């Protein structure tokens, strides 16, 4: 189906009005240049974050204290690459070269742990800022996976509504698996928080990752969000999403007696 097939038959509504009112585009055909640029930017950010997240989490497989934890870490590492490929397939419809894309960046590269990485893009790729920070232990990996996993769930719940229908459908299939990644992290965090030998490290890791994950939602006031909202690519503003994630994270941490 081409995009023209879903536009109003009388052609009295502009494409921008159509998108602003909840209309959907179903293929790359005749996608306006500005829409195309913003759509590709959104998809690139997701792909790069999944690839960087998988690469960074790979070391956690060998840090895992038991076979169950090793299996969980392996599953997360594998499925994040799969999620990236699903969205990269959509990008290839717009001319992106998948083979070259995978080789374009050092996905495991990280900056020093005490560096402040702002929300501007770093190092040439489009990963979220949180994926520029290194993991340093199993406990650290579990905490980061839990908090960022929860953020990803909140972000994807909005992004399934995107006006580019193929991307929304891909996110609907990805969302349950990202939800499970977060749940695996939460199960691991519950064990760490309940053990006196690891509880203090878990608390310190929570304090490290909370503000860094919070930054992944973007600035509270964002002119770009308004542009994306008009295109139907975004629906809920950054601060509303961040507040919902924080309330959710705070409640789950409180159950584990972590601040």
Image (tube, rainbow, N blue to C red):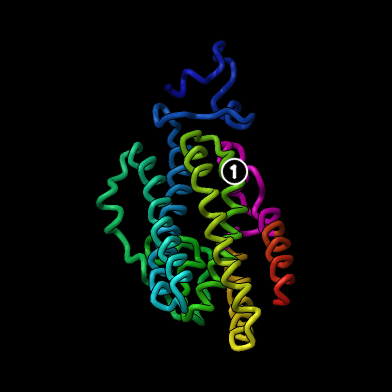
The verdict on residue 229 being magenta is: yes
User: Is there any visible trace of residue 227 in the rendered image?
Assistant: no
Residue 175 in the image: state x and y as whole percent: 54, 48
In terms of image quadrants, where is residue 200? bottom right
The secondary structure type at the circle numbered 1 is loop
For image coordinates 53% across by 64% down, the residue present is 119
Q: Residue furthest bottom?
A: 197
Image quarter where the C terminus lies is bottom right
Residue 36 in the image: state x and y as whole percent: 44, 38
For image coordinates 62% across by 76% down, the residue present is 206
The verdict on residue 128 being magenta is: no
In terms of image quadrants, where is residue 180? bottom right
**Does residue 125 lie above or below 162 as drawn?**
below
Looking at this view, is 101 or 17 the one in front? 101
For image coordinates 53% across by 42% down, the residue present is 172
| Label 1: how many Cα within 10 Å (few below 14, some 14–19, many 20+) | many
Residue 216 in the image: state x and y as whole percent: 57, 61
Give the residues drawn in magenta, as a range.
216-242
For image coordinates 64% across by 87% down, the residue present is 196
Looking at this view, is 132 or 185 the one in front? 185
Image quarter where the N terminus lies is top left
**Does residue 155 lie above or below 61 as drawn?**
above
């Amino acid at each position: 189906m081409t995009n023209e097939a879903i536009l109003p038959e009388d052609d009295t509504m502009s494409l921008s009005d159509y998108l602003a009112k909840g209309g959907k585009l179903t293929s790359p055909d005749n996608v306006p240049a500005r829409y195309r640029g913003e759509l590709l930017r959104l998809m690139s950010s997701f792909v790069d974050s999944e690839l960087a997240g998988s690469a960074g989490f790979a070391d956690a497989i060998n840090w895992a204290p038991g076979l169950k934890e090793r299996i969980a870490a392996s599953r997360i590492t594998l499925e994040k690459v799969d999620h990236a490929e699903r969205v990269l397939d959509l990008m290839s419809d717009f001319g992106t070269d998948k083979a070259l894309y995978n080789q374009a960046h050092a996905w495991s590269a990280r900056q020093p742990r005490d560096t402040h990485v702002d929300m501007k893009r770093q190092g040439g790729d489009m990963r979220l800022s949180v994926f520029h920070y290194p993991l340093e232990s199993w406990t650290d990996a579990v905490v980061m996976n839990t908090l960022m996993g929860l953020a990803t769930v909140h972000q994807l719940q909005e992004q399934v509504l995107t006006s580019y229908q193929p991307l929304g459908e891909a996110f609907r299939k990805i969302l349950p698996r990202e939800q499970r990644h977060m749940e695996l992290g939460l199960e691991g965090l519950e064990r760490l928080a309940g053990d006196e030998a690891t509880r203090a490290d878990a608390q310190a890791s929570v304090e490290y990752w909370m503000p860094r994950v919070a930054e992944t939602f973007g600035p509270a006031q964002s002119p770009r969000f308004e542009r994306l909202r008009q295109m139907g690519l975004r629906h809920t503003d950054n601060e509303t999403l961040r507040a919902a994630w924080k309330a959710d994270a705070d409640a789950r941490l409180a159950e584990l007696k972590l601040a």
